[in-house]
Image: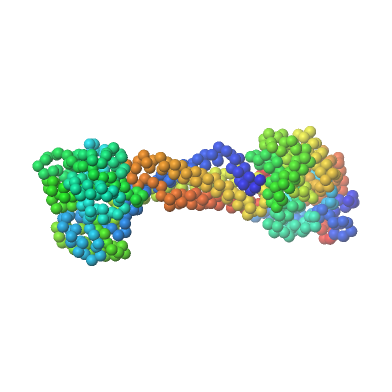
């Protein structure tokens, strides 16, 4: 028998109340885990963004085009190592619900720019040999049941083929890529720019945006400014920013998700403080006589304070830990199931740690006032409540 | 003990052996808002080792207040409280808590056991404050339960025990640290006649066979009759009390005269 016997006895006094409080704390931490996962999923681009990459887009909007010739101009700017372009294709494969990102790229340039992408050597060779060749992310290929060598027809919504009306573009899947970075989008469909540029019915020589690698991430703002200066007063002015800022801006267009998540979490934890705080306050109020008795038996005030604090920490922390464990379990189930739609859906270790830390802190905060009250109780007076 | 000096005010003359309880010129004033409420005024009381003293008096006369002072639960506004040779009115809160754990056993009107714990675990609660080995704790719990006649019911929860049995568990808990002094505040107040008699038998046995000094507050003249001496507290004064309940000798001597 130890002090813990007393703590557990106090928690078992009102089993239903303890259970209800416990469950709501478990649930709150589960919500915390799930929201953290969602937030990670939506801000993934920003999370995995490389500090040494800039995104250069049209100053007015992402959907206006830039001359492909800018690439060579940018590579002249001191500090720029390499530049590469992409273009939003926006086609439909069989059904609009099959949405995935499609873009023409220059294969060698693309693979240089994204070393985190893993493509088998033979797929690279076939891509260079095959004019209408395309590669796709592992998750996308699995979701749509493709196999290397398949013909993939994609219906244009913007980019029609010259002289072919609404006919579908025909691509050939030459390879599948993996990514060695957690959360890297594995649902892209990438095909050759030369094939695209020659066949499209308008906008030849125009591209969507550029990715620019720079030598020194610390000089990113300066180089971004230099790029924008280069094209100032031209027909297509640019706006350059770091990949992280770009991705964050993109996520923010979804709605300020970070703020929403933070507000929900704030509300959840405020509720927890009230629910668990009320339970603890009530529990101490009902036990005034009992606490007086412990003091009479020789328990010091500070020992009584510690007991009540430990009671609260035990209740909230075990519930919080359980909530986080359930969140991890849920992640294990959801992540493979949703990988094809929601590539970044995972619980980051730092969020898990944050949850566990939060559980301990919440337990302490909830317990502190009831514990002080118990500590201050005058023994003789408290005994009158027996 | 001297029949002529029931309140023990002669303690200061040094002739008698060291008393178990020596209360000298004690006063205790509470405050109701800003109004001072004097409950005990210049009260003196001496209890010898091995004595079983019953304290009677009307409700609100200050019996519990006096008991609390002697048991180190409360401190006097003035005067001295010496128990087992320690001037406990001078101890800090923290020291007083430790002193209580070692020297006083408490029995209350309601046994106030922790409902979620078995009888034996309730008895073991005061042992959490000691450094005894698990084995020694076990032994002490067994002995305490044995003394109160509940060896067989150690595993039971309080709600599975009768009122009298619960009170016995409370007494076992008071005994487990083997204190010299037991203070009982209306220990039979919540029990029927028969059960009361059993509890009083137990207290008498603890006094007679185990040498416990007992201070018992009670309303019940039948209970008081079992004690070796009865004092009556009224209007802040202590008086010796006959077993028929009549006050025989009004005693109140100023502390100054005694010391
Ligand atoms: N902690 C306290 N604060 C204020 N008044 C108290 C306190 N304890 C006791 N009293 C008052 O002192 C008086 C004596 O109380 P008590 O010693 O409990 O009486 P008894 O035990 O003889 O019934 C009562 O009027 C009670 O209200
Ligand atoms: Mg009383």
- Can residue B121 be seen here? The reply is yes
The residue that appears at 36% across and 39% down in the rendered structure is: A337
Measured as percent of width and height from the top left, residue B237 is found at 80, 51
Q: Nearer the viewer, residue A159 or A144?
A: A144
Measured as percent of width and height from the top left, residue B135 is found at 72, 46
Relative to B17, say whether A160 is above or below: above
Horizontally, residue A255 falls left or right of residue B7, namely left
Q: Nearer the viewer, residue A24 or B124?
A: B124
Q: Residue furthest bottom?
A: A78
Relative to B78, say whether A176 is above or below: above
Measured as percent of width and height from the top left, residue A51 is found at 32, 59
Measured as percent of width and height from the top left, residue A119 is found at 28, 49
The residue that appears at 59% across and 49% down in the rendered structure is: A308
- Can residue B110 be seen here? The reply is no
Quadrant of the drawing holding the C terminus of chain B: bottom right
Q: Nearer the viewer, residue B132 or A62?
A: B132
């Amino acid at each position: 028998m130890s002090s813990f016997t007393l703590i557990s006895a106090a928690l078992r006094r009102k089993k239903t109340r303890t259970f209800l409080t416990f469950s709501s704390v478990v649930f709150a931490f589960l919500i915390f885990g799930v929201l953290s996962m969602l937030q990670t999923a939506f801000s993934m681009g920003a999370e995995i963004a490389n500090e040494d990459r800039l995104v250069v887009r049209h100053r007015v909007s992402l959907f206006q085009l830039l001359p492909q010739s800018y690439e060579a101009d940018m590579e002249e700017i001191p500090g720029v190592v390499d530049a590469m372009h992409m273009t939003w294709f926006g086609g439909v494969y069989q059904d609009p619900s099959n949405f995935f990102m499609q873009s023409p790229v220059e294969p060698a340039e693309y693979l240089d720019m994204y070393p985190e992408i893993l493509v088998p050597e033979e797929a690279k060779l076939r891509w260079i040999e095959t004019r209408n060749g395309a590669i796709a992310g592992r998750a996308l290929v699995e979701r749509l049941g493709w196999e290397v060598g398949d013909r993939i027809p994609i219906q244009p919504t913007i980019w029609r083929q010259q002289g072919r009306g609404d006919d579908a573009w025909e691509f050939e899947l030459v390879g599948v890529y993996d990514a060695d970075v957690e959360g890297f989008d594995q649902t892209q469909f990438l095909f050759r720019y030369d094939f695209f540029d020659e066949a499209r019915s308008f906008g030849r020589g125009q591209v969507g945006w550029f990715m620019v690698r720079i030598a020194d991430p610390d000089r990113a703002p300066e180089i971004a400014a230099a790029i924008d200066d280069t094209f100032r007063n031209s027909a297509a002015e640019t706006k350059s920013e770091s990949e992280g800022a770009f991705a964050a801006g993109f996520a923010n267009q979804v709605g300020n998700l970070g703020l929403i998540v933070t507000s929900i979490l704030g509300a959840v934890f405020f509720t927890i403080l009230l629910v668990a705080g009320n339970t603890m306050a009530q529990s101490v109020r009902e036990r005034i006589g009992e606490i007086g008795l412990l003091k009479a038996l020789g328990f010091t005030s500070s020992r009584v304070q510690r007991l009540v604090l430990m009671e609260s920490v035990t209740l909230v922390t075990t519930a919080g830990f359980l909530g986080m464990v359930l969140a991890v379990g849920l992640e294990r189930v959801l992540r493979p199931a949703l990988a094809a739609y929601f590539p970044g859906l995972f619980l980051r270790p730092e969020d898990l740690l944050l949850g566990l830390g939060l559980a301990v802190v919440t337990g302490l905060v909830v317990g502190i006032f009831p514990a002080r009250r118990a500590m201050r109780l005058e023994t003789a007076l408290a005994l009158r409540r027996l | 003990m001297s029949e002529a000096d029931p309140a023990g005010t002669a303690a200061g003359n040094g002739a008698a052996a060291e008393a178990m309880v020596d209360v000298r010129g004690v006063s205790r004033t509470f405050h109701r808002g800003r109004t001072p409420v004097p409950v005990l005024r210049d009260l003196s009381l001496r209890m010898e080792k091995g004595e079983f003293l019953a304290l009677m008096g009307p409700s609100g006369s200050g019996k519990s207040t006096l008991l609390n002072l002697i048991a180190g639960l409360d401190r006097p506004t003035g005067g001295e409280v010496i128990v087992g040779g320690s001037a406990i009115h001078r101890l800090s809160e923290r020291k007083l808590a430790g002193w209580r754990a070692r020297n006083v056993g408490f029995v209350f009107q309601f046994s106030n056991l922790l409902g979620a714990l078995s009888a034996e675990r309730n008895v073991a609660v005061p042992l959490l404050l000691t450094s005894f080995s698990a084995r020694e704790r076990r032994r002490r719990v067994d002995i305490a339960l044995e003394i109160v006649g509940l060896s067989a019911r150690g595993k039971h929860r309080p709600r599975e025990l009768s009122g009298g049995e619960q009170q016995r568990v409370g007494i076992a808990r008071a005994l487990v640290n083997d204190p010299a002094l037991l203070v009982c505040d209306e220990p039979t107040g919540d029990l029927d006649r028969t059960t009361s008699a059993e509890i009083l038998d137990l207290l008498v046995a603890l006094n007679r066979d185990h040498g416990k000094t007992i201070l018992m507050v009670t309303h019940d003249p039948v209970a008081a009759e079992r004690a070796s001496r009865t004092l009556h507290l009224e209007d802040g004064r202590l008086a010796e009390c006959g077993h028929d309940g009549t006050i025989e000798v009004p005693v109140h001597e100023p502390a100054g005269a005694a010391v």
